[in-house]
Image: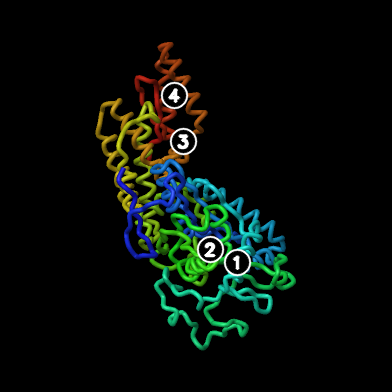
Amino acid sequence: MTSLHLYNSLTNKLEKFESIDPDNVRMYACGPTVYSSPHIGNARPLVVFDVLFRLLKKIYGNATYVRNLTDVDDKINKRAFERNISIKELTDEVIAEFHKSTDQLNVLPPTHEPRATFHIKEMLDIINLLIKNEFAYVVEGHVLFRVKKLDNYGQLSKRSVEDMIPGSRVEVAPYKEDPLDFVLWKPSKENEPSWDSPFGKGRPGWHIECSAMSSKYLGRQFDIHAGGQDLIFPHHENEIAQNFGAFGCLMANYWVHNGLLLVDNQKMSKSIGNIISLDEILQKLDGEIIRYVLLSSHYQKTLNWTDQIVNQAKLALDRFYGALSSATKISDDVDFESKVAAALCNNLNTPLALQRLMEITDQIYKTDDQQEKNRLCSILKKEAEILGLLMRENWFQKDAKLSEEEIARLLRERTKAKSERNFQRADEIRNYLLDNKIKIEDTKDGPIWKVILD
Ligand SMILES: [Zn+2]
């Protein structure tokens, strides 16, 4: 197989990927803050890095993927207060819904999915190390990271420290040694969640949780750190700073970031009212259609979500599934060289990978040789699997008017009628199914059915 190349945001270069330990490639991605369903922009990294996870497993046979859940955050406190439920009730509910959504998107569960609030001890351990190494200081119940102590702060976001200094109109907390210093630990008010610490009752800042959970499950230095490009500054920059300050090494060798998602060329915002939440859109569209749309643009580019692109995705999937339904046998055991994997090895070129699926599909429609059809369909299914597509058993069923069981029963009755030479009954059944948009095709392995599409 061609070797994997990824665009590394740390070096701003397309680089050949070399794992620290090819027997266990390790990847971390920042997961959702669980106060409500994520919007489709946040679904993009879930799907893109799921493809990367699948690819790594295919290339290396083994990969460890950690995606965290941020379950301590002011937005969570606010939402729980508004709904008059406990923080635990809210986060448990949102996490359960989130898992339902990721399943519908065919996103594989990561190897570990740690929750921030289960790792307060690990966070405090790193904070203590940072204090010991003089990269952090305690003041008025806060622990702050001392940014000036780092020579290369800004290496990921390519910002100079001078550019980062907040303008004079921004009020800087008086206890900070320097305006750039960021929070590792802060005191909690009475109605806010809090944990005991050597610095008083309080709660962690956001950035420290990713350093704590990644180092626990992946080690202090790992291969790939992924996330949306909006996380580069300050979140990922601060994760790098924390790991360097505590452990003296670079957190991850490859930093991979996905681009923004726009809706009809606009940024999603509350004021425009164009935010599309994932659970809302999943009630209208099959998760594979959403997944297809999210993979239809290269992950580094801005993706523009429109009705047109959704329709194109649906048509493409109808065509793939239509081709698959012409197979009389799909074999798991088929020998071929994966063109989809080759496309993905080139910095996750998902548009090209989808193009490869279309090419196989064209060949399936062209050939009249059933054995060749079966072979090509087996390849199509395997190729699509790397992209997490074509996983549905009954794609057309959602358009059909009869239940699967009812169709199967009628087909059995028709076969029996034919064997008894009762052709009138056999034709009646055929016509009844046609009225219900079901077309029967007789093959040497018995009858198969398809939904007639409008
Ligand atoms: Zn993070």
Q: Is mark 1 within 8 Å of ligand 1?
A: no
Label 4 belongs to which residue? 429
Nearer the observer, disc 1 or disc 3? 1
Nearer the observer, disc 2 or disc 3? 2
Task: Note whether residue 273 is visible.
Answer: no
- Residue furthest to the bottom in view is 168
Where residue 286 appears, x then y in whole percent? 47, 47
| Residue at screen point 30% across, 42% down | 339
Q: Nearer the viewer, residue 207 or 106?
A: 207
**Sequence order check: which comes first, mark 2 or mark 3?**
2
Residue at mark 1 to residue at mark 3: CA–CA distance: 52 Å
Residue 247: mark in rendering: 2
In the rendered image, the vertical position of residue 99 relative to residue 419, given as above or below: below
- Dots 2, 4 in contact, CB < 8 A: no
Residue at mark 2 to residue at mark 3: CA–CA distance: 48 Å
Q: Residues within 10 Å of mark 4 (few under 14, many from 20)?
A: some
| Residue at screen point 70% across, 67% down | 197
- Dots 1, 2 in contact, CB < 8 A: yes
Residue 133, quarter of the rendered image: bottom right
Q: Nearer the viewer, residue 174 or 302?
A: 174
Where residue 425 appears, x then y in whole percent? 44, 19
Where residue 392 appears, x then y in whole percent? 46, 39
Name the side, left or right, on which 345 lies relative to 97: left
Residue 129: mark in rendering: 1
Amino acid on which the number 4 mark rests in the picture? Ile
Residue at mark 1 to residue at mark 2: CA–CA distance: 8 Å
Name the side, left or right, on which 143 lies relative to 276: right
**Sequence order check: which comes first, mark 1 or mark 2?**
1
**Sequence order check: which comes first, mark 2 or mark 4?**
2
Q: Quadrant of the N terminus?
A: top left
Label 3 belongs to which residue? 393
